[in-house]
Amino acid sequence: MSAVAEGPTTAPAPDAVASGAERSAPGRGSSWWRHSTPLKVVGVLAIMLLSVWLRSHAITAKFWIDEGLSVGIAHHDFWSIPGVLKKDGSPPLYYMLLHVWMGVIGGDGESRTHALSLLCATLTIPTGWWFGRRLFGERAAWATAALCATLPFLTYYAQETRMYALVALLGLCASGAFAMAYGMRSRGWIPAFSVLMVLTVYAHNWGLFLGIGFGAAFLVLLRGEPAEARRAFFRDGVLGFGLLVLLYLPWIPRLLFQAEHTGAPWAEAPDFNGLLNGLQSLVGGIETALLLLVVGVGGLATMRRRAEGAERSRAVVALAVAIGVAVALAWLASQASPAWATRYFSVFVGPALLLAGAGLVRFGKVGLVALAIVLVLWFDPRERQIRGKSDAYRVARTLKDQRLIDKGDLVLAVHPEYGPAMRYYLGGGYRWADALGPVNDNRVFDWRDALDRFKAAGPKRTLAKLEPSVKPGQHLILIMPIIRTASWGAPWTSEIRHRAPQWERALNQDKNFVRIGPVPSFKRRALPRGVRAIVYLRK
C-alpha cells in the first residue's frame, strides 16, 4: 500500500494545499487573477521575454578556452562523443545535445551555440514558476520565476557555449521532482525524479553530489515518518534511487576511467573562503547573499506556524538538506582531489531558487521589499564581463590579416587546451601541436595523464621532434598564454606558467628559426584574457 494512502499521514493533493495556502495568505490580489490561466501564461511569457532581452546583450561574444572545447567535441560524430570524452573527463549529455543543436540551427557560430544556453536559462522561468506554485503557492511561483529570470549566474552562462545553463535547468527540474515525490508524497513523480536526476548527472559530474544530497534528504524525511508509514516510504525511495542508479550504470566504467586518468589538475583545493566565495558568486555577491539568507530563511521558518506548514515544510527540509549536503560533499571531495570551480555551482541553482522564492514571499512586506532589491541588483546584462573572456578571435584574425600564417604552417599551443579554440578561429589547413607534442585530433585536448606527460615533455626535447616537420619558408606559430595574475597555482597551471617562457627562449635561441614578432602588440594597453601568438619563420 502506498504512502499516499496511509491515513493520517496522507498529504493533501498539491492543488488543494495551494488553494488553501493562497486563501490564508494576506494581501492577495483578486480571484480573477488567481484563476485566470491565460493571464498567468501572458505573465510568464512577459518575464521570459524580458529575461531574453537581458541575457542576449553579449550573445555574439567570442569563445574562450572551454567553449572551443565544447564546439570541438560536439563536431565529432554523435555516437562517438562518449568515446571522445575518455580524453576529456566530462559526461556526454551536453555535447551530444550541442551536436544535434548545431545540425538543427545550421552552424557553430558563437550566437548560434550560445542560443542553446540562452534557451535552457529561459526555460528555468516557467519551470521555476510551475514547481514554485505546486510546492509553495502562487506568490512563491512568481517570485521564483522572477529570480530565475534575473539571476546573474544564469545571465552569464546563458551566453556561453558550455553546459552550465543546461545543468541549472535539469537541477531545477530534478529538485522540484524530488520535493514533489518525497516531500509532498506524490508517488507519480518518483520515475520523473529518477530520470531528471540521472540527466543532471549525465550533464555534469557534480550532479553526483546533488544526487547524494537527495539521498541524505530522503533519509531525513524517512526518519520523520510515522512508524506505520516508513515501510511504504522506504519502498518508494528504493524505487526512485534504484531506477536512478540503474540508468546511470552504463556510464560508471567510463566515469571510473576518467577519475583515474583525467581529473582536474588545473584546479586548486578550496579553503573555506573559496566555499563562501562560490556561494556568493551563485547569488550575485555578498549583499544579495546576506539578504536572501536572512530574509529567506526567516520566511521559510514561518511555514510551521501556518496551516499549510506540515506538508510544505517537508519540501523545504528536503531541498535544504539536499543542497547543504551537496555543497559540503563538493567542498570535501575537492580537498582530496581538487575539482573546484564556481561555475560548477550551476548544480545548486535549482534548489536554491526554489527555497529563495518560497522564503522571500513568506516574510511579509519585508520579504517583498527584499525581493525587489534583489531583482534590481540582479538586473545587469554583464556584457563587458562576458565579452572579455578571451582574445583568441583577435589573435587569429590578426595572423590572417597580416598574412603571418599560411596553409601547412605549424601551430603550437603552449597552453595545450587552448588548441581547440584557436583551431575554431583559424580554421582548417594547418598542422597542430602543443607543449606535449604533435596533435592528431585538434578539436579536443587529451587530458589523460596530461600532467605527467607535460612534465616529461620539455620544450627542447619536444621542439627537436617537431622541427623537422617545418620546412624552410614555413611558419611556426607559438600560441602563448597571457598570465595576468598570480592565481596560476594549481599543478597544471603552475607548470604552464613555468614552461611558457622556456618555449619562447628555446625558439629564440634556435638558429633554424627567425623570430618575426608577437601578435598582437599590446604596447601600453592592458593585457587581455586569453593568448597571444609569436611568429617564427623557418630558415
Image (cartoon, helix red, strand yellow):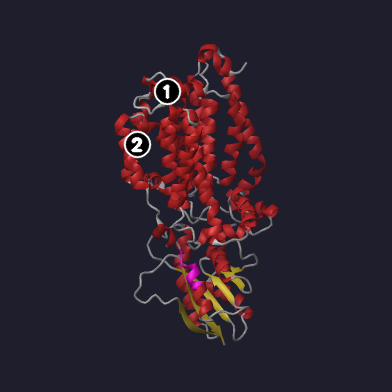
Mark 1 Cα within 10 Å, few/some/many (few <14, many 20+)?
Answer: some
Q: Main secondary structure of the magenta part?
A: helix
Question: Which residue is outermost to the bottom?
Answer: 539
Of the 4 image quadrants, the one containing the C terminus is bottom right
Residue drawn at x 50%, y 37% is 41
Disc 2 is placed on an element classified as helix
Q: Position of residue 71 (x, y in %)?
A: 58, 59
The amino acid at mark 2 is Leu
Q: Position of residue 335 (x, y in %)?
A: 45, 46
Q: Magenta stretch?
A: 390-395
295 magenta-colored: no
Disc 1: which residue = 21
Of the 4 image quadrants, the one containing the N terminus is top right
Residue drawn at x 52%, y 40% is 171
Pick the front one: 178 or 460: 178
The amino acid at mark 1 is Ala
Which image quadrant is residue 460 in?
bottom right
Residue 79 lies left or right of residue 208; in this view the side is right
Give me the C-alpha separation between circle 2 and circle 1.
23 Å
Disc 2: which residue = 293
392 magenta-colored: yes
In the rendered structure, which disc, 2 or 1, sits on the residue that comes first in sequence?
1
Residue drawn at x 55%, y 45% is 205
Q: Position of residue 419 (x, y in %)?
A: 56, 66
Disc 1 is placed on an element classified as helix
Residue drawn at x 51%, y 66% is 415
Residue 197 in view of the camera: yes
